[in-house]
Amino acid sequence: MADQPTSGVPIELRKVTKAFPGGGEPAVRELDLDIPAGEIVVLLGPSGCGKTTTMRMINRLIEPTSGDILIGGQNSRGIDPDRLRRHIGYVIQQAGLFPHMTVAANIAQVPKMLGWDKQRIAERVDELLELVGLEPGTYRDTYPRRLSGGQQQRVGVARALAADPPVLLMDEPFGALDPISRERLQDELLRLQDDLAKTIVFVTHDVDEALKIGDHIAVMQRPGHIVQYARPAEILTNPANDYVEQFLGAGSSMRLLRLTKVGDIELDQVLYASEDADAQELRADIERDGRGYALITDGMRRPLRWIGRDHLEGREGPVGATGDAITGTISHRMTLQDALEELLNADTDNVPVVGRRQAYAGSLSLATVQNAIAAIKARERERRLRRVEAQ
């Protein structure tokens, strides 16, 4: 990828309505939605609730009957539809690759339309194949029919990213895959998003998928309106009404543990410093902190080493390469259940948590997870109590 890939932009839907001729009530009715830049927003709901129609109105594959859609602050009605679509990546179920074209030719479609030269296109194709985990030498000249379903979807994602668009639309992209391939591609998408920070609108009817990948979830109901828009943890612990609760299914603390993300809980904040920090000043900070150790990070705040008081005894000048190498990190997008497994296999009591572009966001310990579980149980009890009182 380029050193500075294009980051996502905000999307705003203002009183957007879509009524099809002879279709009775509108498919989408006066829908308001703010999609933050660089986040994955999931449109979740049953068939016929308007989620795919809503997504397709963003790139004007379907024109709104009324209302406005702003992309990066610009009204989409004022942008030529072809130009708009070339700057919005689009991924559909079963990839939608052209069967008579090689993988490279499929990925190159939009860059060719934009007038890129052959060398730049070839470099971009190889770059994207590596990004989605496909070896360019093996897959560049392969035809789609020779790929598995999961590999085709990876190519579909690469094609959508080819011109480095700020916005990515994904319409049930993993719905036709087997459970193992589906989970792997969900993980791959989250890994890519941490590096690329695109604005992603993702359509699904699968609750677990929405809870796993969404930064925010818009739960939709017929006819085309949003009944709750919130972060996954809030939707799980505080559903807006009976419809949301029934759509989510029976809740339990174990399900919350499996689907709550590390980034949704309060993390430990271990003292950290850069490699050029003064050794004796850091030793004094460690003494004051009371833990007896600190985390050393690079210039991008990525975790490198644990360092203790003993490492700094008698050392003058910058910390440099002193300390013990980090043996593993936990992604802020990892579920608490997966994080718990990582902690049980870790060499240290604390494991650094990394966020966007692998930057240090805090640390996790067994005690942190235990506190999170206790908080989840407390929220569950409060929710049940509110339901009883409401009856």
Image: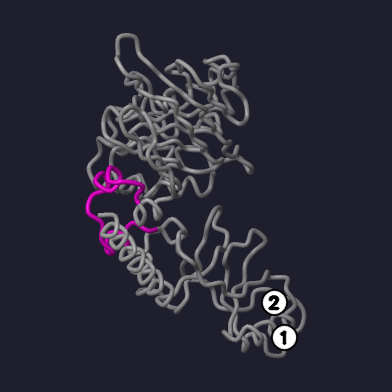
The residue positioned 24% from the left and 46% from the top of the image is 246
The residue positioned 47% from the left and 37% from the top of the image is 200
Q: Residues within 10 Å of mark 1 (few under 14, many from 20)?
A: some
Q: On the rendered structure, is 78 left or right of 31?
A: right
Q: Is residue 246 visible from the viewing direction of this image?
A: yes
Label number found at residue 28: none
Q: Amino acid at mark 2?
A: Val
Q: CA distance from mark 2 to mark 1?
A: 8 Å
For the residues bearing labels 2 and 1, Cβ distance under 8 angstroms: yes
The residue positioned 57% from the left and 84% from the top of the image is 291
User: Which residue ends up furthest to the right in the rendered image?
Assistant: 317
Q: Is residue 240 above or below residue 83?
A: below
The residue positioned 35% from the left and 74% from the top of the image is 344
Magenta span of residues: 239-260
What's the magenta bit mostly, secondary-structure-wise? helix
Is 273 part of what is drawn in magenta? no
- Figure quadrant of the C terminus: bottom left
Displayed quadrant of residue 4? top right
Q: Is residue 192 above or below residue 109?
A: below
Is 246 part of what is drawn in magenta? yes
Q: Which residue is mark 2?
A: 319
Residue 113 drawn at (x, y percent): 54, 17
Q: On the rendered structure, is 159 left or right of 68?
A: left
Helix, strand or loop at label 2? It is loop
Q: Which residue is mark 1?
A: 315
